[in-house]
Image: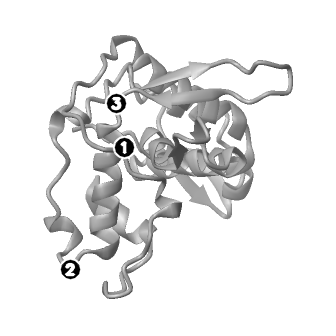
Amino acid sequence: MNDDLTCLMYLLAHDDAAEGPYDRSRTELLVRAAALIDLALRGRLREDGGTVTVSGTEPTGDPVLDGILRDAAGHGWKQLVRRHRRRTLTEVEDRLAVAGLLTVRAPRTRFGTRRSTVTDHAVPAALRARVSAALHGNDPVREIPPPTPHCWHWPRRAASARPCHARTTRPSGPVSTRARDPSAPSRPAWRRQYAPCR
């Protein structure tokens, strides 16, 4: 399984009723931050005196991440999260569309918004179930079983992407609208829970 953090965050934020992210402006920041975290975990971005530096010149194989690497040096983290965030979100949508997981429709007017539909609801449903288990379950995160492998076919190059074929699962709502179980034990913050899931 090849987790693509930017695409996973987009799928978590997607809302079928809204035909796209529930809050597009916030999802722009979420996806952009996810890309920076991914690059930092890969060792490609470092911090030196509050300024981000780029390590290495070889491509990552992900066009979204490669685009960020080209102009990341010399900026602070806060600036990088906001920099080109709309473009990054559009590129993630295009990547998901090429992979066959999303259909994207252009805005109807000049000032309109892109509309998107998830083609295989089993994929975001499995992701949300895993996040819910990490946040509300009783077992250690490292013991949570991974999703079915064929639900997570993330090609390293978008050009070779093929649609996933997974069993049909009833979709669930966005993570932000999921009801919390008052009887569930408190868990650490989400960002601390995700790292072991990679």
> Can residue 142 be spotted in the picture?
yes
Q: Decide if residue 45 is on the left or right side of residue 156.
A: right
Within 10 angstroms of label 1, few (less than 14), some, or many (20 or more) residues?
many
What amino acid type should be assigned to the residue bearing mark 3?
A: Asp
Please give the residue where the numbered disc 1 appears in the rendered image: 124
Locate residue 98 relative to residue 25 in the image: left or right: left
In the image, residue 171 above or below residue 155: below
Q: Secondary structure at mark 3?
A: loop
Q: Which residue is mark 3?
A: 120
Nearest the viewer among 195 and 28 is 28
Residue 138: mark in rendering: 2
Residue drawn 18% across the image and 33% down it:
167
Q: Residues within 10 Å of mark 3 (few under 14, many from 20)?
A: many
Write the residue at 29% across / 52% down.
198
Residue 19: x, y in percent?
Answer: 59, 35
- CA–CA distance between discs 3 and 1? 8 Å
Task: Work out whether 27 lies above or below 166.
Answer: below
Q: In this rendering, which labeled residue sits more in front, label 3 or label 2?
A: 3
Query: In the drawing, does residue 72 fall left or right of residue 153?
Result: right
